[in-house]
Amino acid sequence: MTEISETTRSRFADFGIDIESAMMRAAVVPISMPCWQFDDVSGLENVGATLRGGGIAATGTYPGKPRTGEELRQDIELALCLCPGITRLNLHACYAERADSSVDRDAYTVADFSRWMEWAAELNTGLDFNPSFFSHPNADKGFTLSSPDEKTRQFWVNHGKACRKIAEAIGEQQGNRCTVNVWIPDGYKDLPADRLGPRQRLTASLDDIFSVAVNENAIEDAVESKLFGIGSEAYVVGSFEFYYGYAQKNQKLLCLDAGHFHPTETITDKISSVLMYLPNLLLHLTRGMRWDSDHVVILDDLTKEIIDEVVRGNYLDRVRIGLDYFDASINRIAAATLGVRSTRKALLMSMLQPHAKLKELEAAGDFTARLCLLEEIKTLPFGEIWEAFCIQHDCPGESEWLKEIQDYEESEFPQRA
């Protein structure tokens, strides 16, 4: 392992912090990487087809987009090798690889994801799973689980049920829970006359989906809210208030997406609030920019603030960390890698902070010392600790990881033109 200087060790020792212990703690926190960053949320159901609506839009025309499941997994493998610590993969149902192309989403089975499960087992990589309530003819009218059309609604209910059984099989195989997150794009572009009806239908649909018995040691359910969406600017059925109430009543995980609230509203303060009443929580880290919520995660103040809250509150065993973004304007593999590495940096940075001392000062009412200490720790040396962390996990450092992706792009992408 690269030596960390005695000066750096001394600086952190002054705060009672053991660097090696912090590195070990930061490494074992799972981060779930979004598979959809690698191909612009296109999926594998109809390779080459134009992405349909449903509030999903990836912008950009960067070359080298994978054309098959094998190419997609090959790209993901490279990203996984460049990310230190435990990295999982978040998989959407639209990445099914069907033996029978006539099978629709309401009838998907474990067999349609067998190659993903085999691949994950080979790499010893955990999988999480998401139903795909978008980019489908039955989502074209803007409503899925809250649709007023009973046939459409039942189609999506069946899809949700099928996905939970698939996730159950994934969790049983990998020996740890597969987190299943429900997000729907349902809503109105302009002012609605009936705000209650769609939410009553959504409640009935969710109750139906969750009525199917599953192995609770293999699966955990989450529901995700949004303030607005593309084509649902005026009204979103699955608002924060709706899902918070539903999750609390049914003891489901609530998914807080960092980009699904007003631009001036952060999720940091929500974490401790909702965990007073819910057993666990799912975080979707993203980078909101104006009204667009899906930019690549970087080591910005908001990301650090969210992670600090999770670490300071001792919530690591109750919070699942996933990333949610898709950028087609830059190298897709680099985007996925950068997001995971930035999140891991935030975790390691937080592990290296004197949280106990900060709480002690606060409890004593010494807010001056608390503020000064918060400022002082911002300049503590971190770069050499991160480099040592990467080497410890057989990952390239900051000046090296992008070069590996660029070499791969030069050799692989021309074949995909």
Image (cartoon, grey):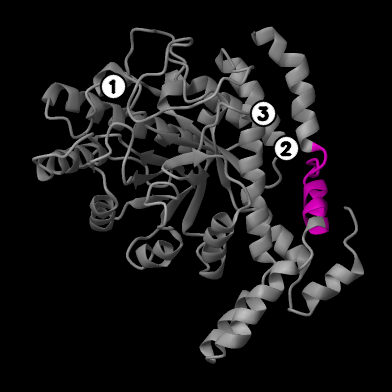
**Residue pointed to by mark 1:** 106
204 lies left or right of 81 = left
Please state which amino acid type lies under the numbered disc 3: Glu
Of mark 1 and mark 2, the one earlier in the sequence is: 2
Q: Is residue 240 above or below residue 315?
A: above
Secondary element at tag 1: helix
Residue that appears at 37% across and 67% down: 273
Give the camera-side residue of 355 and 110: 355
Q: Which mark, by number, is residue 30?
A: none
**Residue pointed to by mark 2:** 82
Of mark 3 and mark 1, the one earlier in the sequence is: 3
Residue 334 in magenta? no
Q: Residues within 10 Å of mark 3 (few under 14, many from 20)?
A: some
Q: Quadrant of residue 311?
A: bottom right
Please state which amino acid type lies under the numbered disc 1: Asp
Q: Is residue 268 above or below residue 82?
A: below
Q: From which residue to which does the magenta span run?
A: 384-400
Secondary element at tag 2: loop
Where does the image place residue 96, in percent across and percent down from the top left? 44, 20
Q: Is residue 356 visible?
A: yes
Residue that appears at 18% across and 35% down: 146
Where does the image place residue 247, in percent across and percent down from the top left? 28, 53
Q: Residues within 10 Å of mark 2 (few under 14, many from 20)?
A: many
Secondary element at tag 3: helix
Please state which amino acid type lies under the numbered disc 2: Leu
Give the camera-side residue of 127 and 275: 275
Where does the image place residue 278, in percent across and percent down from the top left? 34, 61
Q: Is residue 354 visible?
A: no
Where does the image place residue 259, in percent across and percent down from the top left? 43, 47
Name the residue furthest front: 290
Residue that appears at 57% across and 64% down: 308
**Residue pointed to by mark 3:** 77
